[in-house]
Image (spheres, coloured by chain):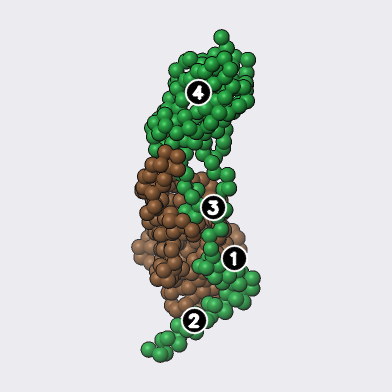
Amino acid sequence: MSHRLSFLKEHFTKVITLSLTRGAWGCIFLLFFFFNLTSCDTYNCLLETKVQYVYGFYNSGGSIAIHDTLTITALDINTVLANRLVDASQVKLPVSYYNDADTLEFLIQGEDGEGSDTLYIEKKNIAHLDDVSCPAHMWHYITRVYSTHHLIDTVLISEPNINYDGKENLQIYFRTD
Amino acid sequence: MARRTCRYISAPIRNSLLVLLVLLSSPLSAQDTLRVELGDTVKIELPKKKDKEMRIYYGVAVGADLVGLGMKVAGVEWSLMEVMARVNLKDKFFPIFEMGLGEADHEGNDLDYRFNVRAPYFRGGMDYNINKKHNGNRLFVGVRYGFSVFNYDLTSPTPLTDPVWNDSRPFNHESLRGTAHWAEIVFGLETRLWKMIRLGWDIRGKFRMAQTTGEVGPPWLIPGFGKNDTSGWGGTFKVMVEL
């Protein structure tokens, strides 16, 4: 038994010696095993990971800024998402993680009075995890959007994917009459 | 007294004898004798070194990688356990097929997210022995193409909470479908350990060519490739039996 063990030991030594005498490759091989078994994960999580609706405001002449105060409320939770914005040409709002649709009220108040419209956004919700060492987020895909038309003329989907890109998702065209 | 046979004969006689041998090949093989008359010249082909080199098939070998097994035993959170079979052609070309099982149970550093996979993978390719001496030691360079089709899980015991709508749902995404294709370049060394048993190692540069992942997120590990990235390193330490 001991003879067999010494025999095996001799041949393993031969392999290791042969590996090392082949120079750099042998060393690289041994280093590979060392690092491979002991290496840590070094995934760098993205710093900018806000997932928001991005609305742009337009009329028939192009992009506009709303000079009156704009207040946006999530109706299903009765929570104000944007309060009394002035001179806004674009606004970023949170997206519900799990609702199939968000219902938002756009209230515009000015010296001449006030008006409001309700916006309905239907969407698909997709959980997203870049790496197990990073926080998860919800991404969304807008499938349909429609509104009342007191102030709003039309709403277009310019980018249905709501993710880390931060592109403008919806273009809200206000009436000019 | 019969003339002694000669190894070297003139070309016309040699050619005519070759034709004669072809014509007589069937009865010759049946009887396994050739009648030689006095005065005939017979060419006897002696085995030459070149004929030995013309031998193509040198056998097959099967083996297993010990690295994956070692990682599994050591409790490392991932392992690639594989077996392989290869053909030896002229002791230079070694078409090889490798298949294995990739496993991982990995938890994120600071968060509770967990990745799980357990799926087979396959590789095919060729090694080339660059050692000119047939002394039992082989130095290999080679290439591989690998692929895997697998399901993986991304889960967390902590639910994902919407901070505005204040709504929570469990983060359990199981059986996400993934596929991956990659190429490898191989450098290895192998020696005879005992009779038919050989021992060797190789290191591999791996290059991911394509992958599809579940919509929730990419897999942390691709079975057969290793940790998911555009490229990576790998290696085997294998025992093979030549049949």
Could you give the CA–CA distance between mark 3 and mark 4, rounded to whole angstroms?
Answer: 48 Å
The image quadrant where one finds the C terminus of chain A is top right
Instruction: State if disc 2 and disc 4 touch (CB < 8 Å).
Output: no
**Residue A84 percent location from the top left of the image:** 55, 28
Residue for badge 1: B130
Instruction: Tell me the residue that label 3 is attached to.
Output: B229
Question: Is disc 3 in the same subunit as disc 2?
Answer: no
* Most foreground residue, B199 or A131: A131
- Could you classify mark 4 by the number of other residues whose Cα lies within 10 Å: few (under 14), some (14-19), or many (20 or more)? some
The label nearer to you, 4 versus 2, is 4
Disc number placed over residue A107 in the picture, else none: 4
Q: Read off the residue under disc 2.
A: A11
Q: Mark 2 packing: few (<14 Cα in 10 Å), some, or many (20+)?
A: some
Mark 1 lies on a secondary structure that is loop
Q: CA–CA distance between discs 2 and 1?
A: 22 Å
Q: With A22 as the anchor, is B177 left or right in this view?
A: left
Amino acid type, mark 2: His
* B240 shown above or below A56: below
* Residue type beneath disc 3: Asp
Amino acid type, callout 1: Ile
